[in-house]
Image: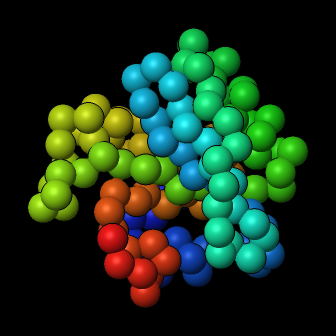
């Protein structure tokens, strides 16, 4: 399930499992993974985009290998918080959950993450 509200997303996360952060670009997908305390994330790899199925398979491998408990999708928002053209082009991909991914999915565009942080 996809959560736009940070508090709802956090409530849905399983305890003591890492998060994966995805930056979905046109040619690459940036991947970062948090520690199990969900306090710090570090870059893991850059996936060169090929076909959706191949990209999804690689991400599924990472999720399984790292025991990921939730995903955070970076959405490129305008400075005023509105959705820009790139964000809108990602909306169809993020508007429904994926049957391949049973983990909670949160979105982040310069909204405070964690909730008490400031952009």
Residue 93 visible in this rendered orientation of the protein: yes
Farthest right residue?
Answer: 65
Farthest bottom residue?
Answer: 116
How far across and down, in percent of the image, does residue 83 sit? 19, 49
* Residue nearer the viewer, 60 or 80: 80
* Residue nearer the viewer, 113 or 119: 119
The quadrant in which residue 29 appears is top right
How far across and down, in percent of the image, does residue 102 sit? 68, 52
The quadrant in which residue 112 appears is bottom left
Report the number of discs: 0
Residue 69 visible in this rendered orientation of the protein: no
How far across and down, in percent of the image, does residue 91 sit? 32, 40
**Residue drawn where x is 61% and y is 42% of the image:** 31
Whether residue 74 is situated above or below residue 41 in the rendered picture: above
**Residue drawn where x is 72% and y is 27% of the image:** 57
**Residue drawn where x is 72% and y is 28% of the image:** 58
The quadrant in which residue 80 appears is bottom left
Which quadrant is the C terminus positioned in? bottom left
Whether residue 11 is situated above or below residue 94 in the rendered picture: below
Which quadrant is the N terminus positioned in? bottom right
Whether residue 73 is situated above or below residue 7 in the rendered picture: above
**Residue drawn where x is 35% and y is 78% of the image:** 118
Whether residue 33 is situated above or below residue 29 in the rendered picture: below
């Amino acid at each position: 399930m996809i959560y736009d509200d940070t508090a709802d997303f956090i409530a849905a996360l399983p305890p003591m499992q890492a998060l994966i952060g995805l930056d979905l670009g046109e040619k690459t997908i940036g991947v970062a993974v948090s520690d199990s305390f969900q306090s710090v994330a570090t870059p893991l790899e850059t996936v060169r985009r090929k076909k959706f199925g191949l990209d999804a398979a690689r991400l599924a491998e990472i999720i399984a290998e790292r025991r990921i408990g939730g995903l955070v999708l970076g959405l490129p928002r305008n400075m005023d918080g509105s959705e820009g053209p790139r964000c809108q082009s990602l909306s169809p991909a993020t508007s429904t959950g994926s049957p391949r991914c049973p983990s909670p999915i949160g979105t982040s565009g310069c909204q405070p993450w964690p909730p008490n942080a400031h952009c």
